[in-house]
Amino acid sequence: MADKFDVIVIGAGPGGYVAAIRAAQLGLKTACVEKWVNKEGKVVHGGTCLNVGCIPSKALLETSHKYVEARDEFAELGIKADGVEIDVAKMIERKAQIVKNLTGGISGLFKANGVTALEGTGKVLPNKQVEVTDHDGGKATYEAENIVIASGSVPVEIPPTPLTEGLIVDSTGALEFDEAPKRLGVIGAGVIGLELGSVWSRCGSEVTVLEAVDSFLPMVDAAVAKEAQKLLKKQGLDIKLGARVTGSDIKDSEVVVKYTDANGEQEQTFDKIIVAVGRRPYTQSLLDSDVGINLDERGFIHVDDQCATSVPGVYAIGDVVRGPMLAHKASEEGVMVADIIAGHKAEMNYDAIPSIIYTFPEVAWVGKTEQQAKSEGIEVKTGSFPFAASGRAMANNATEGLAKIIADAETDRVLGVHIIGQHAGELIAQGVTALEFGASAEDLALICTAHPTLSEAVHEAALAVDGHAIHIANRKKRK
């Protein structure tokens, strides 16, 4: 038997590495197991998010947006920049360097906080033991007072379009194109599909998005989703709703995709396909059959509100458990679990987790949509403010979008905040804070917001809830 730890965390993604660092900071002897190997054959930390997810995709989104901005909008600002071109290889190289810096940073944080990094694949055994198999097949067994499972998720593959190197790829492969494909098909109009489709559309690809569902972004407030669909279409994304992919054929280095829609059977030819239909929890070879940890019908580990599994002393967090598959959700669960293990009281408010789509403009939301609230029998009142009426948005040459607030008609309590606009991902923090502290729309309306800022749009939306907006004409009469 090797060393015994107070806490062993399996997985060093945004849930696992945060849980490990927090546990070590609280004085617990902590180890973190990670199997991810980079192109150089070195084990790296950060999981999907840092290596092939959140961070690299945002690097590509930022570069491609700046390119389009320079190409199409600088002249309007009085900046002469003729002949602007994008160097895709350089864009990919910069993305890789950012990933390298951040993954190396986590390794440094492990050392600084005294976390033992274990390299290999972790498996939970009975009696709170963890078997680690290194990349040469060697095995070592460790004992822990507590185990935190943070094994994350992997992209879902679908039978009609089996992954084929260089032609049909998942989200990971879509981050490595060496040039923009002329005709790009994206299967799935969710967060990942829209972000990756936006990147390559900006770089010159003709992008068609095939979405099986008939509605666009059903998890977003209808007014915001409608605006997002309009703007993305304007940017060149051909989004086909109700398009269910049924098969594919590879012919002469092209992919012929077959799908059905309201008009019957269709087919379209692409140079590359990105499959972005969602992710599934990663539990492969993770649990010994005698451990006794329960999985639901979709493969998620069953946990309670504080991420405890059915086995005492074993917790699970992040994408491998219920709730949105978001890095920040995983991180906060990691903090909560570490605090609980250390004997502190901790809980997490799952009603105040923000979501963001990093297209341009960004789409961000927290809490209920107007449609969801009404379906639950809640009488609501809403207020909206367009960025077209924002002085700062005009100065930024980014007037597309709006901010919307949904409040309980009886209590005035904020139920949801939905934003589409420049830096919506930053602005949504106001909504998260409002929900976390049980704020009313009046509370937001009474806050003195700096001028000129984009955050004034949220302030004005709060004023508009009761027909008191200053910088737009109110539909309601002032009471």
Image (cartoon, rainbow, N blue to C red):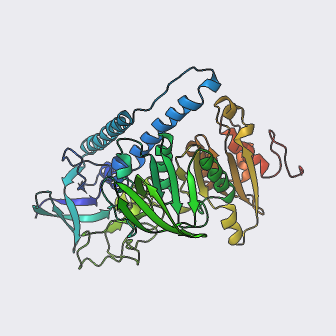
Q: Quadrant of residue 101?
A: top left
Q: Residue at point 54% right, 66% down? A: 243
Q: Residue at point 53% right, 22% down? A: 82
- In this view, the residue farthest toward the front is 252
| Closest to the observer, 288 or 48 | 48
| Closest to the observer, 18 or 346 | 18
The N terminus sits in image quarter: bottom left
| Up-down relation of residue 439 to residue 315 (above or below) | above
Residue 393 percent location from the top left of the image: 67, 34
| Closest to the observer, 417 or 423 | 423
Give the total of numbered labels. 0
| Res 349 visible | no
Residue 187 percent location from the top left of the image: 47, 60
| Res 129 visible | yes
| Up-down relation of residue 22 to residue 397 (above or below) | below
Q: Residue at point 59% right, 53% down? A: 365
Q: Residue at point 47% right, 45% down? A: 205
Relative to 175, 448 lies left or right:
right
Residue 255 percent location from the top left of the image: 39, 58
Q: Quadrant of residue 157?
A: bottom left
Relative to 136, 223 lies left or right:
right
Relative to 355, 182 lies left or right:
left
Residue 390 percent location from the top left of the image: 72, 36
